Amino acid sequence: MDLQSIEKDKLKELYDTIEQTTQNFLGYPVSKDFDYSELIPFLKFPINNLGDPFGESTYRVDSRAMEREVVNFFASLFRAKAEDSWGYVTNGGSEGNLYGLYVARELYPKAIVYFSESTHYSIQKNITLLNTDHIIVKSQKNGEIDYNDLKEAIGYNRHRPVVVVANIGTTMTEAKDNTKVIKTLLEEMAIEKHYIHADAALAGGFAPFITPRPVFDFEDGIDSISVSGHKFIGSPMPSGVVIVKKHNRDRIARRIAYIGSSDATITGSRNGHSPLFLWYAIKKLGIEGFKKRTAHSLAVAAYTEKRLNEIGVNAWRNENALTIVFPAPHNDIISKWQLATEKGQSHIICMPNVTFEQIDSFIADMELVLCELVLCELV
Ligand SMILES: *Cc1c(COP(=O)(O)O)cnc(C)c1O
């Protein structure tokens, strides 16, 4: 049966609303400059990548061959050892974080998980799900973990294994924790049983293309990493990639094999379209495309920071960050530009789709409101 006309109207209304809200969109790290129309024919199929992308499966309406390529692409970007890496395409950064923490807990059930107060809420949620002990450590002013506080907290509990969640781009200020510093700290304290998970949901898509390269990947001491696919790359549906060390994952797989299943991911059925979309984007962009997107975003970010300061707004950003932080502006501006705001601070994230023109138009709005506020005070 066809939709009734009232339902068709509803669809049209939703389409128009989404089309409109997607215009002024500066506050969340989601790229919108994609064109996947070549993949539309694939919407006809019930693609499902259930199970291990690297294992056997009898369900063959899948895109697992593409998924493996996506995983290998990111594993190599994050300098994982090819022979000791494993991963899959997730529903987003949060699931990748859950997976990394799950692997860590299976390795070290008695560990304490440490993370900074600037950490994304998915970590707290995942810790609750996994029922692991945790300690929240202080952040420095820029949002980066306070290494001294971390050291002190670990020192009080040195009989327990340590899991550290390093933020590779915090949600509010895009601060990056230095995983080499964390690794060295653990080794100097002679904490033998340790595990570092990198939450690179935000910055994992471009950190490999920044010079100087942020210190965040497998060669810099991590054991697992999660990145979102819909943020820097952009895709119609949320997605992500998680990479872990294969020998660690094998322990989990064995455990589950013991209860009769060789399933090694979090969910059962898995989105088979999103690996296809990521694969398509990676192939179309190539490394050069990623570099270009990164350079463009950095240029727009620098411009935004400069323009805000020029109109008297106290804006700043971390080194080579795409996120500009400034005191929360007028509510009308927050609402129009969908600016994420927390504790009196707002931010703009210059994802690849953000243009200089958009920033100019945002700055014009800011100036207008600033003028009005001054006038109000004068009256
Ligand atoms: C976005 C984000 C997440 C969560 O990722 P989703 O893809 O939304 O699940 C986790 N951590 C950080 C730092 C993020 O920016």
Image (cartoon, grey):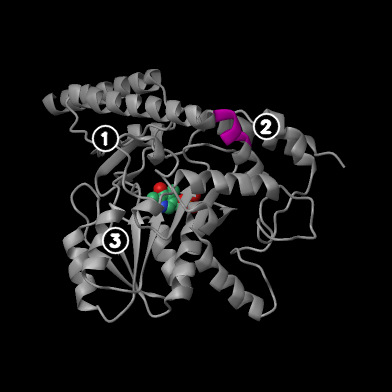
Task: Check disc 2 and report the residue beneath it.
Answer: 12
Left or right? Give the position of 101 relative to 60.
Answer: left
Q: Which residues are magenta?
A: 280-285
**In the picture, which quadrant includes the C terminus?**
top left
Q: Residue drawn 21% across and 46% down?
A: 142
Tell me the crowding category of disc 2: few under 14, some 14 to 19, or many 20 or more residues within 10 angstroms, Cα based: few
Vertical side of 85 occupied by 352: above or below: above
Instruction: Name the kind of residue labelled 3 in the image.
Output: Lys
Q: Position of residue 63 (x, y in %)?
A: 71, 47
Q: Residue drawn 20% across and 67% down?
A: 151
Q: Tell me which numbered mark, 3 or 2, is placed earlier along the sequence.
A: 2
**In the picture, which quadrant includes the N terminus?**
top right
Q: Quadrant of residue 257?
A: bottom right
Instruction: Name the kind of residue labelled 2 in the image.
Output: Lys
Mark 3 residue element: helix
Cα distance between the residues tagged 3 and 2: 53 Å
Left or right? Give the position of 254 relative to 272.
Answer: left
Task: Check disc 1 and report the residue beneath it.
Answer: 329
Instruction: Name the kind of residue labelled 1 in the image.
Output: Pro
Q: Position of residue 191 (x, y in %)?
A: 28, 73
Magenta span dominant secondary structure: helix
Residue sitting nearer the eye, 145 or 212: 212
Tell me the crowding category of disc 1: few under 14, some 14 to 19, or many 20 or more residues within 10 angstroms, Cα based: some
Cα distance between the residues tagged 1 and 3: 39 Å
Residue sitting nearer the eye, 20 or 108: 108
Can you name the residue that lies furthest to the front here?
83
Contact between labelled residues 3 and 1, with CB atoms less than 8 Å apart: no
Vertical side of 153 occupied by 160: above or below: below
Question: Residue 34, can we see it?
Answer: no
Task: Check disc 3 and report the residue beneath it.
Answer: 183
Q: Position of residue 309 (x, y in %)?
A: 19, 26
